[in-house]
Amino acid sequence: MNNFRFLNPLVLFLIFALPCSGCARDKSCDNAWQSNSAAAEIPEGFGINIDFTDPRPGEIKMLSAAGFRWVRMDLKWDLTEKEPGHYDFSAYDRLIAALKPFDVHTLWILDYGNPLYDHGAPPRTEATRQAFARWAVIAGKHFAGRGALWEVYNEPNHSMFWPPQANAQEYVPLALAVGRAFRESLPDEKLIGPATSEIDFTFLESCFKAGLLEYWSAVSIHPYRRSDPETAAQDYCRLREMIKAHTATVKGREVPIISSEWGYSSVWLGFSEERQGELLARSWLTNVANNISLSIWYDWRDDGLDPKEPEHHFGVVFNLYHDNREPVYDAKPAYFAAKTLTTFFRGYRFEKRLEAGGPNDYVLVFRKGNDLRFAVWTTSGNHNVLLPLNPGRYTSINYTGEKSGDVTAGANGAAINLTSAPVYLQTRDNK
């Protein structure tokens, strides 16, 4: 659902004791790479985008095994109201039934037009907005009390999803109508938005000025980019300051940021399945270390088999389903990256970023009780650094789960070779 999919790849190719490094390096952003005591333990803040209501046998089991605790799915207006005032959510009930045994939560996207109203155009007229809001409330009541998140539309700042031309002044009245309807009828359900393609500050500012933060429990964005995912830290800082400015008059009001869709196609120019896996790990680590309360990866499975079509290769598993076999899909490195990160850091919370090496070297510390674990990588090319670890021996595994030997730390720390692929460290007596 990102605009990078629809552009020419050739064009897009041309993008822990010690002081906290984030404060020293990112002087323009005081809240970059900072811990948050209220943050969810890993893996509770990770999820995946899907595009089906009827999973195949073994599919949700495999999805859950990778540590995905949320699925984000379109709840389409036109599929659930095919006659005016008559609503059918049975397909989505089947999905909920399939997710329940694995304790996977839902982020429903309330989206798109309906041919019963304005010939299927985006809800830009008052009558259609009210019809959409009525439908949204009926959907909310149907699934109420199950811990779902409700997202108002998908990428309304993109003409593909708000044709013929995206317009914040058309989206805002719709979001306000849904917000007011939910507040009146479903005050305990959590509404989020606007799920912008990339971090569209102009569009977001329009939403905030219109008062939508009064109704939203979180701001959702899609931080797509061809550059390193760590660059999102500064964008998050800017967005957080914008949110703060528009909620300053409400005492104690904090609106978190959710990354409700972000991924990398493994066939973009200069990319590969291995790089896609590295970037999943780095995207999630960046988000966790920058107080992003939920990270939804795009996508679960590849959409097709065309080796040159980027949209077919965002998945963490390949497209082909294998009946009567486990796993039911062939996993890509991104799948193992997700599974390794969520398994290795299960029950841990981000604590701090260490000062080590240069500004593009990342050493993140995670804590569970008295136990510390580390994630290390760089964006500056392979090189050696001295990590400020306590003396002792550490087990090292790479981002896809393979053991990569032991690391010994002396009085001055441990020497390690950093690469773009994250490596995870734990003390040998605490496996």
Image (cartoon, rainbow, N blue to C red):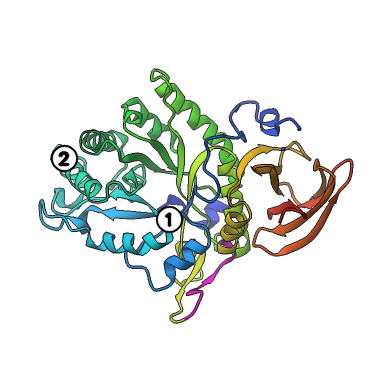
Callout 2 touching callout 1 (CB < 8 Å): no
Task: Compare residues 282 and 270 and report the one nearer the observer.
Answer: 282
Q: Where in the figure is residue 329, as x and y percent of width and height? A: 49, 73
Task: Compare residues 325 and 161 and report the one nearer the observer.
Answer: 325
Write the start and end of the magenta stretch as one range. Answer: 325-334
In the structure shown, which secondary structural element does the residue marked by tag 2 occupy?
A: helix
Disc nearest the viewer among 2 and 1: 2
Taking the image as shown, residue 379 lies to the left or right of residue 214, namely: right
Q: Residue at x 18, y 58 (%)?
A: 88
The circle on residue 6 is 1
Looking at numbered disc 2 in the image, what kind of residue is underneath it?
Gln
Q: Report the residue that reaches farthest toward the top.
A: 249
Is 329 contained in the magenta span?
yes
Taking the image as shown, residue 328 lies to the left or right of residue 26, namely: left
Residue 358 shows in the view: yes
Looking at numbered disc 1 in the image, what kind of residue is underneath it?
Phe
